Image (spheres, rainbow, N blue to C red):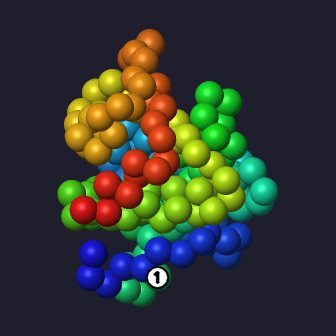
Amino acid sequence: MHGTQIRQACSDDEERIRRFLADLSLHTQTLRFFTGVTSPAAGLVRTLLTVDERRDALIATAEGGEIVGHAMSYQGECSDVEIAVVVADRWQGFGLGPRLVDMLLMRAAVRGAKTVGMDVLGENRRVLRLIRRLWPDAEMTVASGSVAVTAMINQAGLFAE
């Protein structure tokens, strides 16, 4: 990912994250949020930028500071940490999503997390194939059009391929 940097999100990113979300295609918005977010609410933007003892948030930026990816984790109910990732449409397929996941899980593991969970929309076949390939022992439960995934973080190093 030549020209991209990954760093912790901060409150100064509010307007850029708002633009990032609004610029995502409806399809990408739906795969990430299970709905469209063409006009992101202030509460959603703040949530995506919150970093504290229970939450972590990373952003990927291109040259010039444009946000091209976002990843977040939070203390989970069925796993130690739950994650969610979205990458700008034109940046998809170049490995930025897996890089964000790697860094997010590395940071979670440092804080003691051993398991990771995620909810994936059933039609998000690209991500489901990646999960099956990289976490063959992941537990997957299908319910109401989404797939709840639980896996061991120590296997997440495979994302770094």
Q: Residue furthest right?
A: 53
Instruction: Determine whether, in the image, residue 48 is placed left or right of residue 103.
Output: right
* Res 95 → quadrant: bottom left
Question: At x 61% / y 69%, what residue is drawn?
Answer: 9
Q: Residue furthest top?
A: 144
* Res 12 → quadrant: bottom right
Question: At x 69% / y 43%, what residue is drawn?
Answer: 75
Q: Is residue 125 visible?
A: yes
**Crowd class of label 1 (few under 14; some 14 to 19; many from 20; radius 10 Å):** few
**136 up-or-down from 17: above or below:** above
The quarter in which the N terminus is drawn is bottom left
Reading the image, the residue beneath label 1 is 65
The spot of residue 111 in percent (x, y) is 68, 58
Instruction: Determine whether, in the image, residue 92 is placed left or right of residue 109.
Output: left
Q: Is residue 127 visible?
A: no
**50 up-or-down from 115: above or below:** below
109 and 13: which one is in front?
Answer: 109
Question: At x 42% / y 25%, what residue is drawn?
Answer: 139
Instruction: Determine whether, in the image, residue 77 is placed left or right of residue 117.
Output: right
- Name the element at disc 1: loop
The spot of residue 137 in percent (x, y) is 35, 31
The spot of residue 13 in percent (x, y) is 61, 72
Question: At x 39% / y 31%, what residue is drawn?
Answer: 138
Instruction: Determine whether, in the image, residue 2 is placed left or right of residue 48.
Output: left
The spot of residue 157 in percent (x, y) is 38, 57
30 and 38: which one is in front?
Answer: 30
Q: Say which amino acid is labelled 1.
A: Gly
